[in-house]
Image (cartoon, rainbow, N blue to C red):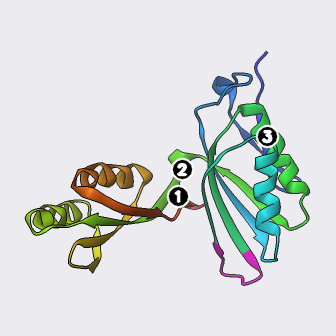
Amino acid sequence: MRRVGVVMMEAGTPQLVKLEDLHVPGQLSGRKHILSILVENKPGVLARVAGLFSRRGFNIDTLAVGPTDDPSVSRITLTLDGAVHPIDQVTKQLHKLVNVLKIRDMEPEETVAREMALFKVSSAVENRAEIIQFAEIFRAKIVDVARRTMTIEVTGSADKIEAFERMVRPHGLVEMVRTGEIAIGRGHE
């Protein structure tokens, strides 16, 4: 018997999520979940939300938290790959947390998602021009130049950031830091 999961949006407003083809008990679904969670901007809320996923064995791939247009509300955007049944259970349990206001399980195809990364790359005189060319190709910004290194800012999809990393790694990737994905629905949503 196939099961269709329901992810609750706002209290009392169910939205059907088509999960028929993803139901494989005990295994990862392969579906990337992008959860947008509006919470009250209060101490400890992030720890409670992250703890809920941790206790159920989910690995959060990316996590970004920031203010909204309302200073009393923050948006938590997290991405994960999860088993079908437990993602529904976790979402229902998130709704029970007092400080959680709204949850959206965003469809990747209907979402604009971006991430920012900073790359510190070895840039000896002989390879500096090639690194600058990579930055131009990827529409990246060089934000710092030192004698032996360059720091480059790349903004875009996770695939774009990973592709840039593959290009500069052979030149000597000294350090890399990524923000985690933020996302917003396309169109009228």
Magenta stretch in the rendered image: 66-73
Contact? badges 1 and 2 (CB < 8 Å): yes
Q: Is residue 71 magenta?
A: yes
Q: Position of residue 57 (x, y in %)?
A: 75, 40
Rendered position, 72 above or below 74: below
**Upstream in sequence: badge 1 or badge 2:** 2
Location of residue 71 by image quarter = bottom right
Q: Which residue is mark 1?
A: 186
Q: Residues within 10 Å of mark 3 (few under 14, many from 20)?
A: some
Which residue was labeled with disc 3?
88
User: Which residue type does callout 3 highlight?
Assistant: Asp
CA–CA distance between discs 1 and 2? Answer: 6 Å
Q: Earlier in the sequence, mark 1 or mark 3?
A: 3
The secondary structure that most of the magenta stretch takes on is loop
The residue beneath circle 2 is 110
Q: Helix, strand or loop at disc 3?
A: helix
Determine the CA span between mark 1 and mark 3.
23 Å
Left or right, 105 with reference to 154? right
Whether tag 3 and tag 2 are in contact, CB under 8 A, the answer is: no
Which quadrant of the figure has residue 161? bottom left
Q: Report whether residue 51 is seen.
A: yes
- Kindly identify the amino acid type of the residue bearing the numbered disc 1: Arg
